[in-house]
Image (tube, grey):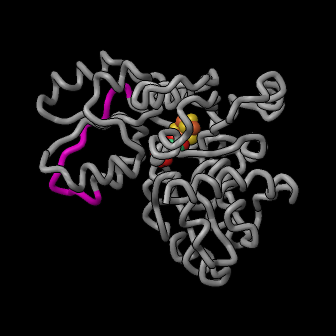
Amino acid sequence: MTLTEEILHWKKVRNAVILAHNYVRPELQDIADFTGDSLELSIRAKSVKAPVIVFCGVRFMAETAKLLSPDAVVLLPNPDAGCPMADMAAAEQVRKYKKENPEAFLVAYVNSSADVKAEVDLCCTSGNAETIIGALPADRKVLFLPDRNLGGNMNLRLGREMVLWPGCCPIHDAVTPEAIRKARKEHPGSPVLVHPECRPEVLAEADQALSTAGILKFVRNSSDKSFIIGTEEGILHRLRKENPEKEFFPLLPPMVCADMKKITLEQVRDVLRDLSNQVELPERLMKDAVKPIEAMLDASR
Ligand code: 13P
Ligand code: SF4
């Protein structure tokens, strides 16, 4: 049996569903039942009826799937796949902030641990941040965590003054306006699409700032024939597969999230066979952490 055949075999035995983020290795995207951005994956994890979910992404995503599908066995094929940005906010620090600022309303980017989610009022993803934050009362003091870039970009777009946690995605934070200007010179006329985890000065230089699903949709509906892509390079696989007649130029230097590349086909086979690397969260924590995610899903409907 080939590796793919083995995976399909065990998937059937376990009656499992494979969910994958748009950044993971191409071969994982190809065997997944569903590939999407964080918002789409949360919605899918909630509606999925399978007893076993294999999550090809990073830990906070697998935790979110577990919170939304508590009766399912959720498998994270490589337990070391984390998110450096999520690690920039610890629950203890958030509790300290709450004690010192009891009047503040806390909004957490979904790129945060379940421990942190349990401390906040509301979650958002890059795909719904504008809707979610835009609906908050203008005079309310809001702390946004952990991404100072996404929060800062929302402040600018919505004319708000949210307090920003000092975290960021190291991969998106490294993009510079100069890189965009250079790419535009090399590929004149191609729109520049970046992710809102990039710095505000980068968004000022780009044509669009969109979640990964937003980038895929924009390209699908655009009459342009070529695009400059300013997000993690894993998205190029779907962009090229779904739009074979269009051209995609990644911003340089290459944007690679090492954590998003940690999961391999072999590991997917192994966890399906052994039911290993299950995401397990204490019951009390699950009850608290699911609330801001449910509130987000309600608010973005
Ligand atoms: P989205 O796919 O939700 O845009 O998120 C990007 C990301 O950084 C996930 O880690
Ligand atoms: Fe975290 Fe950035 Fe990697 Fe996404 S791309 S998982 S935000 S480090």
> Residue at point 40% right, 41% down?
233
Q: Which image quarter has ligand 2?
A: top right
- Residue that sits furthest to the top in the current view: 178
Identified at 79% across, 52% down, the residue is 288
Image quadrant in which you'd find residue 108: top right
Q: Is residue 195 left or right of residue 193?
A: right
Res. 220 image quadrant: bottom left
Q: Is residue 30 magenta?
A: no
Q: Residue at x 63, y 32 (%)?
A: 145
Q: Which x, y percent locates residue 298?
A: 57, 59
Q: Is residue 252 magenta?
A: yes
Q: Nearer the viewer, residue 181 or 290?
A: 290
Camera sees residue 258: no
Q: Specify the quadrant that holds the N terminus.
A: bottom right
Describe residue 225's horizontal placement relative to residue 55 as left or right: left
Q: Work out whether residue 10 or residue 109 is closer to the camera in this orientation and state it.
A: 109
Relative placement, left or right, of 238 versus 91 is left
Residue 230 position in % (x across, y down)? 35, 34
How many numbered discs?
0
Magenta region = 241-253
